[in-house]
Amino acid sequence: MPKQDNIPTVSGKESVILDILLDQPTTEMYGLEIVRNSGKRLKRGTVYVTLSRLEDKGLIESREEEPRSDMSGIPRRLYKVTGYGRRVYSLLQKIREAAHLLPAHSVVLP
């Protein structure tokens, strides 16, 4: 569970993943699907590390896909944004919007 007394941070890659997952908030996605939907902003080699970091922060959650008879191999891991992740993302979007309203010489803390 994330520490509630710390201000959450989200990297650029983490933000891309949150954007993709929140574009279809009721749909769970697997890692390579997220890469495919990223428009070349994410690569296969970094997506799973980034997903793990987001999960450690409590911003997303995952579960193993139910095995299907028409599918071979190991089940995929499916990801979705948590309620906490939605709130953090919304707050960060508001901060970004407000930052665009500030004069160029102003300092904005993350």
Image: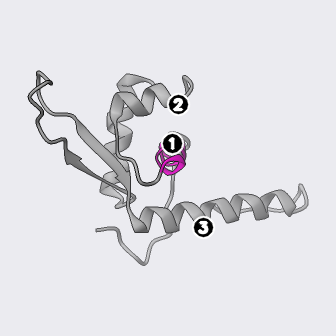
Q: Can you identify the residue that label 1 sits on? A: 20
Could you tell whether 87 is left or right of 44 in the image?
A: right
Q: Position of residue 13 (x, y in %)?
A: 51, 39
Q: Secondary structure at mark 2?
A: loop
Q: Position of residue 99 (x, y in %)?
A: 78, 60
Query: Quick one: 101 or 89, which is closer to the camera?
Result: 89
State how far apart marks 2 and 3 are (Cα).
Answer: 22 Å
Kind of residue at badge 2: Ser
Q: Residues within 10 Å of mark 2 (few under 14, many from 20)?
A: some
The residue that appears at 12% across and 33% down in the rendered structure is: 68
State how far apart marks 3 and 1 are (Cα).
Answer: 17 Å
Q: Secondary structure at mark 1?
A: helix
Instruction: Report the predominant secondary structure element of the magenta stretch.
Output: helix
Comes first in the chain, label 3 or label 1: 1
The residue that appears at 28% across and 43% down in the rendered structure is: 78
The residue that appears at 46% across and 53% down in the rendered structure is: 25
**Is the residue 73 above or below the residue 20 in the image?**
above
Query: Quick one: 76 or 16, which is closer to the camera?
Result: 76
**Is the residue 24 above or below the residue 41 in the image?**
below
Q: Can you identify the residue that label 2 sits on? A: 38
Q: Position of residue 52 (x, y in %)?
A: 30, 45
First to last magenta residue range: 14-24
Q: Secondary structure at mark 3?
A: helix
Could you tell whether 47 is left or right of 16 in the image?
A: left
> Mark 1–mark 2 contact, CB under 8 Å?
yes
Q: Position of residue 70 (x, y in %)?
A: 13, 24
The answer to if 28 sits in the magenta stretch is no
Q: Can you identify the residue that label 3 sits on? A: 91
Kind of residue at badge 1: Ile
Kind of residue at badge 3: Leu
Q: Nearer the viewer, mark 2 or mark 3?
A: 2
Q: Residues within 10 Å of mark 1 (few under 14, many from 20)?
A: some
